[in-house]
Image (cartoon, grey):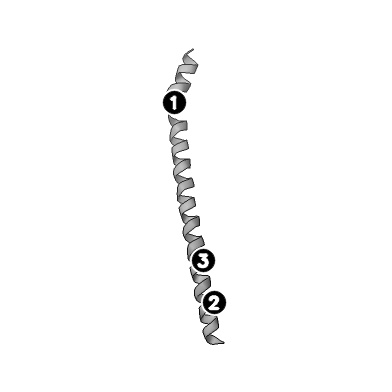
Amino acid sequence: MNLIKNFIAEEDGVTAIEYALIAALVAAVIAAAVTTLGTNISAMFKKVADLIK
């Protein structure tokens, strides 16, 4: 019975899950920013290439 009480009281797993969620959120924001930035840079290079022609 003590083993079950100790398992329920353990908070290390909860902290690990919180850090994993934060890391996933940061990764999603970075992916969205890179996608948007990549699209904008691609459009800029296309505009420059059209001006050179």
Neighbor class of circle 3 (other Cα within 10 Å; few <14, some 14-19, many 20+) is few
- Mark 3 to mark 1: distance in Å? 44 Å
Q: Amino acid at mark 1?
A: Glu
Report the Cα–Cα distance between label 2 and label 3.
Answer: 12 Å
- Image point (49%, 17%), residue name: 4
Numbered tag placed on residue 37 in the rendering: none
Mark 2: give few (<14), some (14-19) or many (20+) Cα within 10 Å: few
Count of labels in the image: 3
In the rendered image, the vertical position of residue 10 relative to residue 49, given as above or below: above
Q: Position of residue 38 (x, y in %)?
A: 51, 66
Q: Residue at x 43, y 35 (%)?
A: 15
Mark 3 and mark 1 lie on one chain; the one further toward the N terminus is 1
Answer left or right for 47 relative to 11.
right
> Residue under circle 3?
38
Q: Secondary structure at mark 2?
A: helix
Of badges 1 and 2, the one in the foreground is 2
What distance separates the C-alpha of mark 1 from that of mark 2?
56 Å
- Of mark 1 and mark 2, the one earlier in the sequence is 1
Q: Specify the label residue 46 is tagged with.
A: 2
Q: Nearer the viewer, residue 5 or 46?
A: 46
Residue at 46% over, 22% down = 8
